[in-house]
Image (cartoon, rainbow, N blue to C red):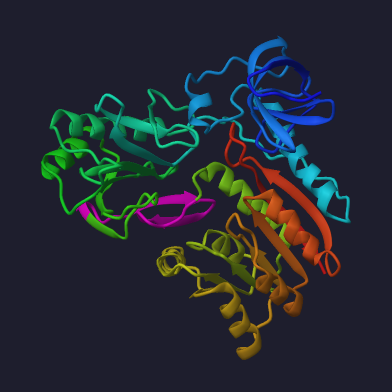
Amino acid sequence: MKIEKNKEYIVDIIDNGFQGEGIAKIDGFTIFIPNAIKGEKIKILIVKVLSSHAFGKIIEIITPSKYRVESDCTTYKRCGGCSLRHIKYEETLKMKQNAVQSLVNKTLKTKINVLETEGMESPYHYRNKAQYPVGLNREGKPVMGVFANRTHEIIPIDTCYIQNKETEKIAKYIFNFIVKNNISIYNEKTRKGLIRHIVTKIGIRTKEIMCIIVINGKSFPKETELVEGIIKNYKNVKTIVKNINTRNTNVILGEENINLYGDGIITDILGEYKFRITPLSFYQVNPIQAEKLYNLAVKFAGITKEDVVFDLYCGIGTISLFMSKFARKVYGVEIIKEAIQSAKENAKLNDVKNAEFIAGDVEKILDDLVNIKNILPDIVIVDPPRRGLDNNSIENIRKVKPKKVVYVSCNPATLVRDLAKLEDMYTIKQIKPVDMFPYTNGVECVSLIEL
């Protein structure tokens, strides 16, 4: 049967893909359908046909899944953030476990059973950072919210169920001040106008809040009045920062920060450690789950007081500090200089003396530590970006031969790809997903391999 665009079909959903989309087959031809759940019978409209597969959209759910729920969010389908919001939370955890298991089965010689996904007790309002684009709608009126999925159209959002309630109120206060005082708003097409983004960060345990106003210029009208209004109405705001971004870019923050109030820093607590958070520093957006993630990495590593640990891609030193309590020495490596500066300050803040942080390319620093300084790690922790490890880093791990490697990954596809390259030398012992981003298709994993 030839599948035709704009034609309706009735299909059975036989599986869910890695993005949470439903998968159906028509005469062996694969159809991907967003918001469909395995086990459902659905009437669909074909919206796109390619040579190997097609895409459909739901017209009618004939037989719903027992895991389907009425979503509490009216805009999740358009914004694309919480793509699993129509599914019972416990089932989303199983789906993530199954998605990782499927990748393991396809890629690895070792058919290890992926452990159950570590879920969140209350998977709501968990994000500690919000980035709201500000722009003009089709009528030319100011709008703040989130970008619609795969577009730059801004969807106004009244309540987001994954953002922090307090910082959401503050962002709305800032936006209303901007509109009330006719402060110009950035237009992506003309590249004119001032206000580009409103960004908020909160220490989940300290309750300290940072507000960042991103502008296309050096200053905006009534800066002092806005600052006074924020600190009068929101007592937990510890710092307000003006971020300068005049570039034609999708990157939200520019490199220049000007403190309008406070010192540009807030703190938060993870485990027994305190961390400084700056406008540009990376800090896990779900600290509740990050704590579980890091404790799991420590548990998998089984560090002793004799062990030297290398933490590659260490960021602001979060995992390094968690490891330092158990190790003889920890070396943290990260290419971003500002992150390493924060890591050093975090070590000092927590009186940790056995952690050393080095800024530079992971491959070069690893080579320098091992071949020039003759420092060999017993355990290596890697927490790379989504693209995973480069071949040089993998070769360096193979040369150094640490007894254990703990791989923390935000992308299961590149995780299993990299594990496959180490499989001849290492035994894959454990892989456990952690639900860092409930109701989204994101899944973090902690893996242990041993020599």
Residue 97 image point, x, y percent = 75, 39
Q: In front here: 64 or 334?
A: 64
Stretch in magenta = 259-283
Q: In which quarter of the image is the N terminus?
A: top right
Above or below, 408 relative to 336: above
**373 left or right of 217 in image:** right
**53 left or right of 336 in image:** right
Q: In front here: 139 or 122?
A: 139
Q: Quadrant of the C terminus?
A: bottom right
Instruction: Please indicate, yes or no, whether residue 265 appears anywhere in the rendered image.
Output: yes
Q: In which quarter of the image is residue 425?
A: bottom right
**395 left or right of 125 in image:** right
Above or below, 423 relative to 16: below
Q: Quadrant of residue 439?
A: top right
450 is within the stretch colored magenta: no
Instruction: Please indicate, yes or no, whether residue 306 appears anywhere in the rendered image.
Output: no
Above or below, 6 relative to 55: above
Number of dots carrying numbers:
0
Q: Residue at x 77, y 37 (%)?
A: 98
Residue 327 image point, x, y percent = 64, 70
**114 left or right of 238 in image:** right
Residue 295 image point, x, y percent = 64, 52
Q: Quadrant of residue 372?
A: bottom right
264 is within the stretch colored magenta: yes
